[in-house]
């Protein structure tokens, strides 16, 4: 490999895309096109970056499978950062296999890391954890190793294993300092600060207080029956009753839990569950049906007893009942949570990540846009959504810097 390609690769590894372009900006051979694509990605021009990487793969040809596989890995990361979650995963798996067979373990590890990161992004935590069990991050360089530890921490946070998340973030911090990339170090610091920020509200016996993530883990392990409005589940001593696909039942049990140990009137329950202002006999009949379904869903965890005016929640084994609620009961909170990463999402990618229909997501985006909470970029199929920009560091785009070393 010639000296200009080597120098450009070193500049990219150091997080200096402009310096890299100074060496290769006028060249159109395969290795130079690949490095130019990575440089443009680091500068934020993702459309141009993908075009350059595809040109590089064509220029390299079938006789250079390793270099082509590296281009595929780089394009996969650009797709991930662009929130193009429909990018063909099989192409990334094939690139991983080629790199591993040819001894490029650093980029093979990076390809596997991207697969794990994508699974985390779309909420496939079980699959992501299975890949992590067989994954060795040692071949990764300092920057992608820090990013991998951020993913490990992200999974631990989603699982509410906060001690494990802190350990992973400490490893990420060491790797980020080793990489000497300022924006990456800032991203790790931002993730660490999340652990010490208020995460949710605890509502119990008519009183509410904020909780840190460190407080939530022991709460869910305690003898308290927790109605988790963040994940729409009921938790008791590690056992979970999922209600995320049964919004009426969850609305009813939340209202009963917030009022515990008191009861909730039938009129209030009808308003909570159905939005009924003036109940008639059909509403009351439907309420009886839904209460019966809720009793069955709760099983041995709790019962629901009729009172003079309504119903009261009756835990079987729990000492207390509490509601774990978001800091703000924001409409379309799940959509806003995805957009909180600062990236531009398509509605189709959000639908995939949330497990919802694209039309449902689009209606939520339209509501949020009306309230000025999100904004659209582009038109038609190229339209992307993001929250209004705020000062701060963008999410780090890490590309396989070992591409320059092959």
Image: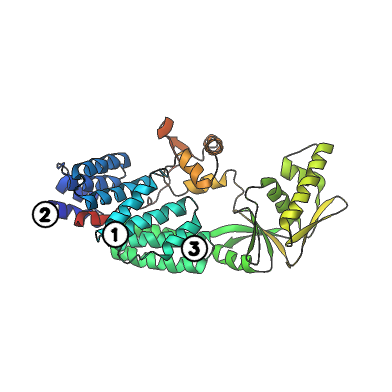
Residue at 21%, 46% in the rendered image: 62
Question: Which corner quadrant holds the N terminus?
Answer: bottom left
First in sequence: mark 3 or mark 2?
A: 2
Front label number (1 vs 2): 1
Q: Alpha-carbon distance for marks 1 and 3?
A: 28 Å
Q: Position of residue 171 (x, y in %)?
A: 38, 68
Q: For the view shown, which residue lies furthest in the top direction?
A: 380
First in sequence: mark 1 or mark 3?
A: 1
Q: Position of residue 372 (x, y in %)?
A: 51, 37
Residue 279 seen in the figure:
no
Question: Which corner quadrant holds the C terminus?
Answer: bottom left
How many marks the image carries: the answer is 3
Viewer-nearest residue: 351 or 396: 351
Q: Which residue is under mark 2?
A: 3
Mark 1 residue element: helix
Q: Alpha-carbon distance for marks 1 and 2?
A: 26 Å
Disc 1, disc 2: CB below 8 Å?
A: no
Residue 254 drawn above or below residue 137:
above
Q: Which residue is under mark 1?
A: 100
In screen coordinates, is 162 left or right of 175? right
Residue 190 drawn above or below residue 347:
below
Residue 309 seen in the figure:
yes
Q: Which residue is under mark 3?
A: 156
Q: Position of residue 154 (x, y in %)?
A: 46, 59
Disc 3, disc 2: CB below 8 Å?
A: no
Name the disc covering residue 47, or none: none
């Amino acid at each position: 490999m010639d000296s200009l390609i080597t120098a450009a690769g070193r500049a990219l590894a150091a997080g200096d895309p402009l310096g890299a372009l100074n060496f290769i900006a006028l060249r159109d051979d395969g290795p130079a096109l690949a490095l130019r694509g990575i440089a443009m990605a680091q500068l934020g021009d993702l459309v141009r970056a993908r075009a350059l990487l595809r040109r590089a793969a064509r220029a390299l040809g079938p006789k250079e499978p390793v270099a082509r596989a590296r281009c595929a890995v780089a394009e996969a990361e650009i797709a991930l950062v662009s929130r193009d979650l429909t990018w063909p995963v099989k192409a990334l798996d094939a690139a991983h296999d080629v790199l591993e067979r040819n001894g490029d373990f650093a980029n093979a590890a990076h390809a596997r890391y991207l697969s794990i990161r994508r699974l985390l992004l779309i909420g496939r935590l079980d699959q992501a954890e299975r890949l992590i069990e067989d994954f060795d991050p040692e071949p990764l360089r300092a920057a992608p190793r820090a990013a991998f530890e951020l993913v490990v921490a992200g999974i631990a946070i989603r699982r509410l294993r906060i001690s494990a998340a802190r350990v992973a973030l400490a490893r990420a911090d060491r790797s980020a300092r080793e990489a000497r990339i300022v924006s990456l170090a800032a991203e790790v610091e931002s993730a660490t600060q999340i652990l010490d920020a208020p995460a949710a509200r605890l509502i119990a016996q008519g009183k509410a207080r904020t909780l840190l993530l460190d407080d939530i883990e022991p709460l869910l392990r305690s003898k308290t029956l927790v109605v988790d409005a963040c994940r729409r589940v009921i938790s008791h001593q590690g056992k979970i009753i999922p209600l995320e696909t049964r919004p009426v039942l969850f609305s009813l049990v939340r209202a009963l839990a917030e009022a515990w140990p008191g009861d909730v009137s039938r009129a209030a329950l009808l308003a909570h569950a159905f939005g009924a202002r003036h109940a008639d006999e059909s509403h009351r009949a439907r309420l009886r049906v839904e209460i019966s379904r809720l009793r069955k869903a709760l099983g041995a965890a709790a019962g629901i007893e009729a009172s003079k005016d309504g119903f009261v929640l009756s835990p079987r084994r729990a000492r207390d009942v509490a509601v774990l609620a978001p800091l703000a009961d924001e409409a379309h909170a799940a959509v806003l949570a995805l957009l909180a990463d600062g990236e531009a999402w398509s509605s189709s990618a959000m639908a995939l990540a949330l497990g919802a229909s694209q039309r449902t997501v689009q209606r939520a985006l339209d509501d949020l846009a009306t309230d000025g909470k999100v904004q659209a970029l582009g038109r038609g199929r190229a339209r992307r959504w993001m929250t209004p920009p705020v000062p701060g560091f963008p999410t780090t785009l890490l590309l396989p810097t070992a591409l320059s070393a092959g």
